C-alpha cells in the first residue's frame, strides 16, 4: 500500500508476535517499543533471528534517524 521497499522500511510496534513478527517476515527492519504488551524480558527469551533490530522505551528513544 505504501509502495516502500521492505529493506528500507522500519516497522515500529509494541507486540513481538504481531507487528515485529510480520515485519521480520516481510524483510523490514524492526523496532519494539516497550509502551505496550511486550516487555524487554520477552525479547531476551527469543532466538536471535526473531528479535527486533532495536528496543526502546518509547518511540522518541529510537536510535534511528
Image (spheres, rainbow, N blue to C red):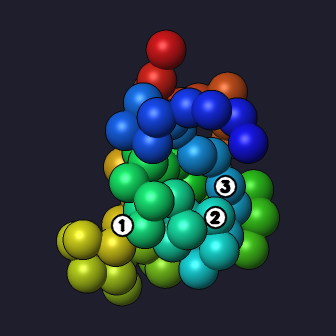
First in residue order: circle 1 vs circle 3: 3
* Circle nearer the viewer, 2 or 1: 2
Q: Quarter of the image containing the N terminus?
A: top right
The residue pinned by badge 2 equals 19
Q: Position of residue 6 (x, y in %)?
A: 45, 42
Give how far across and how far down residue 51 sits, in percent: 36, 66
Q: Are marks 3 and 2 in contact (CB under 8 Å)?
A: yes
In terms of secondary structure, where does tag 1 sit? loop
Q: Earlier in the sequence, mark 2 or mark 1?
A: 2
Q: Which residue is mark 1?
A: 51
Residue 9: horizontal and vertical position, in percent?
50, 35
Q: Residue at x 55, y 68 (%)?
A: 22
> How many residues crowd mark 3 within 10 Å: few (<14), some (14–19), many (20+)?
many
C-alpha separation, residue under disc 2 versus residue under disc 1: 12 Å
- Residue 44 in percent (x, y) is at 35, 75
The residue wearing badge 3 is: 13
Q: Secondary structure at mark 2?
A: helix
Q: Residue at x 25, y 81 (%)?
A: 47
Distance CA(mark 3)–CA(mark 2): 5 Å
Residue shown at 62%/46% (left/top)? 12
Q: Give the CA separation, mark 1 to mark 3.
A: 13 Å
Per the image, label 3 sits on a secondary structure element best described as strand
**In this picture, residue 33 sits left or right of residue 43:** right
- Which of the 4 image quadrants contains residue 27? bottom left
Q: What residue do we see at 59% from left, 80% from top?
A: 17
Amino acid at each position: 500500500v505504501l509502495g516502500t521497499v521492505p529493506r528500507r522500511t522500519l516497522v515500529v510496534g509494541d507486540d513481538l508476535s504481531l507487528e515485529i513478527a510480520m515485519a521480520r517476515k516481510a524483510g523490514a527492519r524492526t523496532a519494539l517499543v516497550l509502551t505496550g504488551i511486550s516487555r524487554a524480558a520477552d525479547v531476551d527469551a527469543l532466538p536471535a533471528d526473531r528479535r527486533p533490530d532495536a528496543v526502546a522505551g518509547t518511540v522518541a528513544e529510537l536510535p534511528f534517524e
